[in-house]
């Protein structure tokens, strides 16, 4: 058993169901979310847990109502036209990328398949300071007196130049257009910024990630812990 002063434990909660119409499965879903516990950060743990539980239940409601109705309509259309039945799918899973002292960082990949050639995945992320019970903004991780947005975009473009093959030809323009200050998470090595599917590269290239290492300007979030 590992004992640590700032130990944050995580329990995985899963909401899962196969939904049927006329005895046929038309939609399956699996929604995962974390439930954290910590002797040091009990108040913040409640805030974090309420946030992720509410997020999961809201998505579950959407899936069971709106997405299910879409699945039924698609099923009836498939049957009427003699097509193979396409089962809709919804999956929401997370990956914890930083869990140290008072910092917890993670991202969620929400996948939906509603027919067609492939499904679509959308990523969101949060980095928490458990001492304050609030999310950390990307701007808070930069200490030097420069435009942090420009600094990150330049780093991304420079990394792409090393291997431009997976990207659209006008990647520099697209990086400028689609860079989002909310699309980041922390790792022990540095801050990772990411771009959604299709934003700067074809679908086959996946969600593109770029590591911005900690240095004199980019601050490791653990330094925020007292």
Image (cartoon, grey):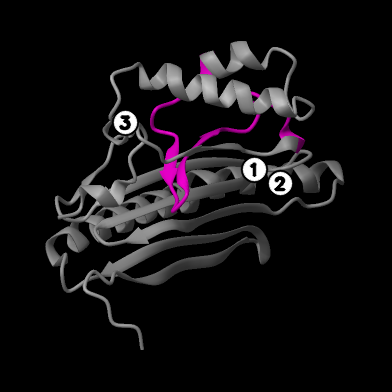
Mark 2, Cα crowd under 10 Å, few <14 / some 14-19 / many 20+, is some
Q: Residue 21's x, y, as percent?
A: 62, 59
Asked if residue 174 lies in the magenta stretch, the reply is: no
Q: Which residue extends farthest front?
A: 216
The answer to whether residue 32 is above or below residue 65 is below
Which residue matches tag 3?
142
The answer to whether residue 118 is above or below residue 61 is above
At 40% from the left and 38% from the top, the residue drawn is 215
- How far is the residue under mark 3 from the one under mark 1? 49 Å
Closer to the chain start, of discs 2 and 3, is 2
Q: Residue 107's x, y, as percent?
A: 45, 49
At 76% from the left and 37% from the top, the residue drawn is 204
Which residue matches tag 1?
73
- Is residue 161 visible in this depiction of the protein? yes
Q: Nearer the viewer, residue 1 or 24?
A: 1
What span is in magenta?
Answer: 177-204
Mark 1, Cα crowd under 10 Å, few <14 / some 14-19 / many 20+, is few
Q: Which residue extends farthest bottom?
A: 1
Q: Quadrant of residue 46?
A: bottom left
Which residue matches tag 2?
76
User: Can you say which quadrant of the picture contains the N terminus?
Assistant: bottom left
At 56% from the left and 55% from the top, the residue drawn is 91
Are the two marked residues, 2 and 1, in contact with CB atoms closer than 8 angstroms? Answer: yes
Q: Tell which tag, 2 or 3, sits nearer the viewer.
A: 3
């Amino acid at each position: 058993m590992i004992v640590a002063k700032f130990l944050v434990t995580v329990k995985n909660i899963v909401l899962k169901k196969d939904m049927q119409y006329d005895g046929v499965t038309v939609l399956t879903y699996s929604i995962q979310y974390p439930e954290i516990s910590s002797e040091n950060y009990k108040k913040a743990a409640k805030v974090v847990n309420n946030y992720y539980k509410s997020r999961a239940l809201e998505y579950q409601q959407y899936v069971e109502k709106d997405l299910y109705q879409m699945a039924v309509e698609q099923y009836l259309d498939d049957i009427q036209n003699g097509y193979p039945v396409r089962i809709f799918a919804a999956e929401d899973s997370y990956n914890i990328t930083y869990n140290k002292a008072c910092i917890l960082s993670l991202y969620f990949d929400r996948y939906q398949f509603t027919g067609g050639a492939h499904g679509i995945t959308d990523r969101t992320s949060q980095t928490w300071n458990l001492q304050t019970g609030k999310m950390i903004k990307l701007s808070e991780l930069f200490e030097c007196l420069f435009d942090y947005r420009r600094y990150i975009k330049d780093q991304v473009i420079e990394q792409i130049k090393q291997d431009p093959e997976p990207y659209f030809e006008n990647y520099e323009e697209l990086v400028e257009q689609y860079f989002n200050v909310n699309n980041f998470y922390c790792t022990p090595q540095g801050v990772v910024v990411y771009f959604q599917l299709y934003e700067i590269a074809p679908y086959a290239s996946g969600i593109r990630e770029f590591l911005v290492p900690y240095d004199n300007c980019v601050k490791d979030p653990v330094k925020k812990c007292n």
